[in-house]
Structures are given as C-alpha cells and as structure tokens.
Image (spheres, rainbow, N blue to C red):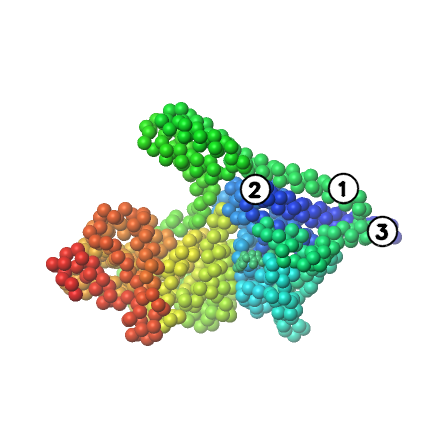
C-alpha cells in the first residue's frame, strides 16, 4: 500500500515537475522572442514591435486552464499564451513581425497586422467552418484598446445560448452543452475604456462564462496607474460587482504576476467556475513588469523612476519563477541555465528561418525583375537610365516588395513610348505581380467563398391580386416568424426586442412563440449589443443585433468598423462573423431620430454589406439573402414605413433580393434620379408631378449601397436620359456624393452627360423637430421637383424658363 501511494505521489510530483519545466521553457521561449524581436526592429528588419515580456508567467497558467473549444479575445501581449497553447510557433511569430504575406507563414493575418495580433483559423479554405470544439480558438485581435471586450461578451454569451437553447444541441462542432469558456485579456490602463465597463456590466447581468484577465503592469504607456483607475486598482474599484451568496455577479480574484502557484490555482479555479456554473470571473493579475518598455516606439527610462525600474528587475516573473523552481527543488540552477541556453538557440533558429522565408520570396522577385529590366535595357533607347535603376535596386539593403515594384513601374513609365516588343516581358511580369500583390494586400475585403452575397440565388417575391394589403411591419413579422421556425441558429436581441417585439413590433408575439433564447431583450448598450452579435456569429450562430434607431449606431460604429468590417480582411479569410445589424432610420422626428448618416457608414464599414430597403417587402428579401450568405451586414429599414400598406408576398421567408442590383422604379427619358430608402417615395411623388409638365423621370432605387450597382444599371439609364441627379437624406457630401463617385469612377458616363451630374441632400445640420422641422431640413417633393427642373433649365432655358 505504502509503495503504491508513494508511486502515486512520485508520479504526481513527476508530472508536476515536467509541467513546471515545460512552462519554464515556454516562458523563456517567449521572453527570448521578445528580446530578439526588439533587436530585429532596431536593425531595420521589421517596422514596429510590441512584445509580451513581463507577462509570461500568467499566460502559461492561462494556457493550462484553456481547453479545446474555448475562445480567447485578447490583445498584443498574449504571445506566451499562444505559444504555450501550441497555436503560435516562434517562426510564425517572427513571420508576422516581418509582415510575411503568406497564410502558412503567419496564419493569424498573413502579414496584414502588425506583430502581436493573434488569431487562429476558424475556417477551411472554402470558407466552411472547422470543428471549433476540436481546437483552441483565438478571435482575431484588434489594436484599439478594450475593443476586444464587446466580442468577448458575445463569445461567452454563445455558450449560454448553446446550453439553454435546445435547438442548438446537435451543433457539436460549435459547442458541447455550452461548456466553452471565453477568456479575455486586457491591460490595466485599457480598463478605463467605456467598452470595458459596458462589457463587465453586461456579463454580470447575463451571467456568461467569461474570464477576464487583467495584465496590470502599473502603466498605460507612460501614464501611471493613479491617472487611470479609481483607487488605483481595477479589482478594488469593481468590488460592487463581486457576487455574494444571495446575488449574482462576478467572482473577483487577485493574484501576483510572479507567483506561479497562485497563478496556476487562480486560472484553474476561474476556468472551472466559468465552465461549470457560467459565472463570470475577473482575474486581476498585479505586479507585472515590462522589461523592454511599452513598444519599440520609445524607451521607458524616459518616464519610469529609477526605483520603479529596479523594482521591475527584481520582480521579473521569470526571475521569480527560477527562484521558485530552485527553492522548491524542482531543478537546479545549472539545469535551468541549460534549458535557457537551448531555448535561445532554438528561438534564434526559428527567427532566422522566418527571415529566410520572408526575404527569400522577395529576393526571387527582385532577381526576376532585375533580369527583365536589364534585358529590356539592352533593347531600349533609355538603356543607361534603366541600368542605373537596376543597379540601385540591386544595392538596396533588406529590399522589400515596394522597392522592386516601384522600380519596375518607373521603368515602364520611362519606356512608355517604345515598341510593344521591348516592353512586353516586363509589362507581363508587372501585371502578374499586380494580381499576386492584390491577393497579398487587398483581397478578402468581402467573402471570397461560394456563400458571398453575390452568389445567392435570386428568388422573386410572389405577389398577385389576391395578396392582402398589410402594414409593412406585418411583412417583417411574417418573415421573422418563418425564419425562427426554419433556422435554429437564428436569434435576435436588442433593446425592447423581446417582450414587445421591438419598438415597431416586427417581432410582436414571437418571443412568446419561440422563447426567450430566440427573441430577447437587452439593456441599453449599443456597443456591446454589436459585440454580443460579433462573438455569437464567430461561433457559428446567426445573430441579428438590433440597434433601436440609426442615430444610435454611432455607439457601436467603432466596433463595427474596427472589428466586424475588417475581420475577413485582417485574417485573410481565416474568420468570419456573419452578423446582421438591423436598425431603422432616415426620417421620423428631430435631431436624434431622423438621422441618415450614410456617409459615415459608407466610409467606415467597407467590408460589410449595407442595405437600404425602401419598404418592408424588400427588407424581408434582403434578410433572406443575408441569412443564406456568410457576410456581415447592416440593414436600415425606413422608420416611417412600418404602418404603410404593402402586399404580403406568398413566398415570405423564401424570396430573396439580390445585393448590388438597383431596381428601376419608374422608366423615363429626360433625367435619371438615383436614390434609396424613404427618399424613393418622395422622388416618385416628384416624378408624378413633373410628368404633368411633360418631364419624364427615370427613378432608380439602388437598394444596397455596399455593394453598389454591380451591373452598371445606372450608367445604362444615363446613356438614355443624359442627365442624372443623386438624391438622399444625408448631409451634403455624404451618401449622395458616394453614389455620384461610384457612377463617375466605375461606369464611364461622362461622355453621355448633357448636364453636370448633381446631388440633392438634406441640410448640413441635424433635422429640426416636428413636421415643419422635417420639411425645412430634409429634401421634400418640392426640392426634388425644383432641382430636376433647374437641371432641365440649364440644358434648355427656353423650354424650361427660370423659376
Ligand atoms: C482606443 C485607443 N486609444 C489609444 C491607443 C494607443 N495605446 C496603445 S497601447 C496603450 C496603452 C495600453 O496600456 P495597458 O492597457 O495598460 O496595456 P499594456 O500595453 O500596458 O499592456 C495606448 C494608450 C489605442 N491603441 N487605442
């Protein structure tokens, strides 16, 4: 007996010793990667570096508690965690530092993101989901501080849904009974952001399995803690969030960043609590250091006192870990030194391999270009200049792709007047490389899979004389009813969406019918409503996040812009979050309920689909299309359209509306008016009035602004009418100017125009209250009539005398 139990203890001890030395190896590997990374930047081999030194020990502990199926949403300090998990090799780490554009070299971002931005690949090459429960998952990082938090909420919330919504129980590639924990990391200073607080409150309300680890090194770049956080401690400041025996809330833990045992226990406990009981945990890791300062952009000696710098040396977590290992008898100093020497060699080997792979690709391109330029020079009248350019290129130290391509372009410009025979080879090389470089630097703004909206089959709405006239909102209600019935992954949430079925009642009665896990209310928190949707969509669900009014999209636009709209691009197709954001806008009452800030949206949401349905029949068809696709979208319904009568299509839920295909609402010959949304009715009314004086307008509803008229329907119309007006309710220079730019740049209409193309927009200020406020703020029927008439007057003043 004694022998057996001794074995057990020894076995346990042996496992623990192995584990400790493995953790030591990871911590050191990461540290040496940081130290060498900084040198690479200073040697000019990389542009910028931000490293995880000083945060290693906590991250090996977090990796130990992290399980397959779990998700991380963190920030640029998490390299040790990723390495210890086996999701980041040192070579990949350096590939990202150098900006290697190959997905295999840098699986997180294919060189698109600066170093320290981590992600695992959730998707196969064809865009289909991998089994997320069979792998470790890291949601793709973003740089804005705390912007990882809202989606962390969504990742955790998805576990809640998977556990409680029985319709999802078969989706075992995405969840096993909601047992997955979402682990967040954030710097102490970044906890000052609104996003952090909004996320924490929502997680406390929702009771989701979320563990937030705060890496506290006492500074936010140069600014010390006392300027960031009440009481100088985020866990202290948040004590009111602590759960009690009678109240739900957070579990709040504090641990030191150099205390290996404390960290292991804290992370294990946090993970277990969150996983089993869906209790959110705040894990405040204090006493962390930053041996090399914040990033390669500056040195911390400028702002840290001598005493602080000395303290950071003395309390370095790796030093303390060494002391702990030795004093506990797990290894001798010599053994640890041996490990360190081996780690150094291995980190250097992988760093060098990353450099060879990165620079090797460019060297090949450079050599090809040099040969072609020299060959071209032999035949060219600009020989001397060309040889000079080639020689200069050859001399470049650490050449990058830009050096090669810009030289080639200069050469092509110099020889522009020479014969095709002379130019051909170099030109072909350039064209081929333009394609390759497009793929390297510009691809995947949108889905490149068969589920892209552009591939969605068009199924027309079926309406006939017997189709009943109903309120617009009833069409949406019928659509959502059908979709909730047929698509178990679909759910919706937002302010007042649950019990009353949204403020315009498109979900009326649907919570009662389908339950609170399908149609749900949230607190007032637009930013984390978006984050909740992003996180859930990242986990294979089909969320519809509702923003009550378009004007309040501003609270969520940062996240939409920085995270959702860039997701497919910044992971080069490695992740997707096909979230649908539903909102309503354009026209109702006053400054904050009538907005139509389309310019803002169009500039900041490239990468998303932006739908502007003129009525609810079109909106329902657009939702159907989006739910078949894998692209994220914003749909802006017309605020004043819910009570207008429309015919109920017989195939509600099934018909689709194609994206990027405008619809001609009225045919005409004199002038094309391009518009969308609520303005369609105003323009149609104006067209009817103008018809009475013999003016024939062609009215086009663009239907979606992103993508925009992919078939050149507007250009074809202008070829016929030779005049065009772009009208909307945004401020001047906003959505109307975007439409004008799209048509001028992409549809070669200039030679067909008999009059200058014009825009008609709202006033530059926000719309004033009440009907008169609306009339004098937004374009009216009279405004459209007069604007069109003025264009006609300029074309033919005799026939159309000045008003
Ligand atoms: C929204 C936003 N504001 C400012 C910055 C610039 N910035 C980058 S890191 C940083 C300090 C963050 O400090 P902390 O959260 O403590 O994390 P640490 O870098 O110390 O790990 C700042 C101000 C940013 N990236 N995003």
Q: Is residue 12 visible?
A: no
How many marks the image carries: the answer is: 3
Residue 716 located left or right of residue 18: left
Residue 155 located left or right of residue 482: right
Q: Secondary structure at mark 2?
A: loop
Disc 3: which residue: 6
Residue 516 located left or right of residue 660: right
Task: Tell me what residue is drawn at x 24 percent, y 66 percent.
Answer: 783
Q: Is residue 779 above or below residue 435?
A: below
Farthest residue, direction right? 2
Q: Is residue 308 visible?
A: yes
Q: Earlier in the sequence, mark 3 or mark 1?
A: 3
Disc 1: which residue: 338
Where residue 44 is drawn, which disc sits there? 2
Relative image position of residue 36 (x, y in whole percent): 64, 44
Q: Secondary structure at mark 3?
A: helix
Task: Tell me what residue is drawn at x 61 percent, y 37 percent.
Answer: 353
Q: Quadrant of ligand 1?
A: bottom right
Mark pair 1, 2: CA separation: 31 Å
Which of label 3 and label 2 is nearer to you?
A: 2
Q: Is residue 787 above or below residue 343?
A: below
> Does the residue tagged 2 have its C-beta within 8 Å of any atom of ligand 1?
no
Q: Secondary structure at mark 1?
A: helix
Q: Is residue 707 above or below residue 499?
A: above
Q: Nearer the viewer, residue 690 or 208?
A: 690
Q: Earlier in the sequence, mark 1 or mark 2?
A: 2
Residue 130 located left or right of residue 451: right
Which of label 1 and label 2 is nearer to you?
A: 2
Relative image position of residue 308 (x, y in whole percent): 69, 59
């Amino acid at each position: 007996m004694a022998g057996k139990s001794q074995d057990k203890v020894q076995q346990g001890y042996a496992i623990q010793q192995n584990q400790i030395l493995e953790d030591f190896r990871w911590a050191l590997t990461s540290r040496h990667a940081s130290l060498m990374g900084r040198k690479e930047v200073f040697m000019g081999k990389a542009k910028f570096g931000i490293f995880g030194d000083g945060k290693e020990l906590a991250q090996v502990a977090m990796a130990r508690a992290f399980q397959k199926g779990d998700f991380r949403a963190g920030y640029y300090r998490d390299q040790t965690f990723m390495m210890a998990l086996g999701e980041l090799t040192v070579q990949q780490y350096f590939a990202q530092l150098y900006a290697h554009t190959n997905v295999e070299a840098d699986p997180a971002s294919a060189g698109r993101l600066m170093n320290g931005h981590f992600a695992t690949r959730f998707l196969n090459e064809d865009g289909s989901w991998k089994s997320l429960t069979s792998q470790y998952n890291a949601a793709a990082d973003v740089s804005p501080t705390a912007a990882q938090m809202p989606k962390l909420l969504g990742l955790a919330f998805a576990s809640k849904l998977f556990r409680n919504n029985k319709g999802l129980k078969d989706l075992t590639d995405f969840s096993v009974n909601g047992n997955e924990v979402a682990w967040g990391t954030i710097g102490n200073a970044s906890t000052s952001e609104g996003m952090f607080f909004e996320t924490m409150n929502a997680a406390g309300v929702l009771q989701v399995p979320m563990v937030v680890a705060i890496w506290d090194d006492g500074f936010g770049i140069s600014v010390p803690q006392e300027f960031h956080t009440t009481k100088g401690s985020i866990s202290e400041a948040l004590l009111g969030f602590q759960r009690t025996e009678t109240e739900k809330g957070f579990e709040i833990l504090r641990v030191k960043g150099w205390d290996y045992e404390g960290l292991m226990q804290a992370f294990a406990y946090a993970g277990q609590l969150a996983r089993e009981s869906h209790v959110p945990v705040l894990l405040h890791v204090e006493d962390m250091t930053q041996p090399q300062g914040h990033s390669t952009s500056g040195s911390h000696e400028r702002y840290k006192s001598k005493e602080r710098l000395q303290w950071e040396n003395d309390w370095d977590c790796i030093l303390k870990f060494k002391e702990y290992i030795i004093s506990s008898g797990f290894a001798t100093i010599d053994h640890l030194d041996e490990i360190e020497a081996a780690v150094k060699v291995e980190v250097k080997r992988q760093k060098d391999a990353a450099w060879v792979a990165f620079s090797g690709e460019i060297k090949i391109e450079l050599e090809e270009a040099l040969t072609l330029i020299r060959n071209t020079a032999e035949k060219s009248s600009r020989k001397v200049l060309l040889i000079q350019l080639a020689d200069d290129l050859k001399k470049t130290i650490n050449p990058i792709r830009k050096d090669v391509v810009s030289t080639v372009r200069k050469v092509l410009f110099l020889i522009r007047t020479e014969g095709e025979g002379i130019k051909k080879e170099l030109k072909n090389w350039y064209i081929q490389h333009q394609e390759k470089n497009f793929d390297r630097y510009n691809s995947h703004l949108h889905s490149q899979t068969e589920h892209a909206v552009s591939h969605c089959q068009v199924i027309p709405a079926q309406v006939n004389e017997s189709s009943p006239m109903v309120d617009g909102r009833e069409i949406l209600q019928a659509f959502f009813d059908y979709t909730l019935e047929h698509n178990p992954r679909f759910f919706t949430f937002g302010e007042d969406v649950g019990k009353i079925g949204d403020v315009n009642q498109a979900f009326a009665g649907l919570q009662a019918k389908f339950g609170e896990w399908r149609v749900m209310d949230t607190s007032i928190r637009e930013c984390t409503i978006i984050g909740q949707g992003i996180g859930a969509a990242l986990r294979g669900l089909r969320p519809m996040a509702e923003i009550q009014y378009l004007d309040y999209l501003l609270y969520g636009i940062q996240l939409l812009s920085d995270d959702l709209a860039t997701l497919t691009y910044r992971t080069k197709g490695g992740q997707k979050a096909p979230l649908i954001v539903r909102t309503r806008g354009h026209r109702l009452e006053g400054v904050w309920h009538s907005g139509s800030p389309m310019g803002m949206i169009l500039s900041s949401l490239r990468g998303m689909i932006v739908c502007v349905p003129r009525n609810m029949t079109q909106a329902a068809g657009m939702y159907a299309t989006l739910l078949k696709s894998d692209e994220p979208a914003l749909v802006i319904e017309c605020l004043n359209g819910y009570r207008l009568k429309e015919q109920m299509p017989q195939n509600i839920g099934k018909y689709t509306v194609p994206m990027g295909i405008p619809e001609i609402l009225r045919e005409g010959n004199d002038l094309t008016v391009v518009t969308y949304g609520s303005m369609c009715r105003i323009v149609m009314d104006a067209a009817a009035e103008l018809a009475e004086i013999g003016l024939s307008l062609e009215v086009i509803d663009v239907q979606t602004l992103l993508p925009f008229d992919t078939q050149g329907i507007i250009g074809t119309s202008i070829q016929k009418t030779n005049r065009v007006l772009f009208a909307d309710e945004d401020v001047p220079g906003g959505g109307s100017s975007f439409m004008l730019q799209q048509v001028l740049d992409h549809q070669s209409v200039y030679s067909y125009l008999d009059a200058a193309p014009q825009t008609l927009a709202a006033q530059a200020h926000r719309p004033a209250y009440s009907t008169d406020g609306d009339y004098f703020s937004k374009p009216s029927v009279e405004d459209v009539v007069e604007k069109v008439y003025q264009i006609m007057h300029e074309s033919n003043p005799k026939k159309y005398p000045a008003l």
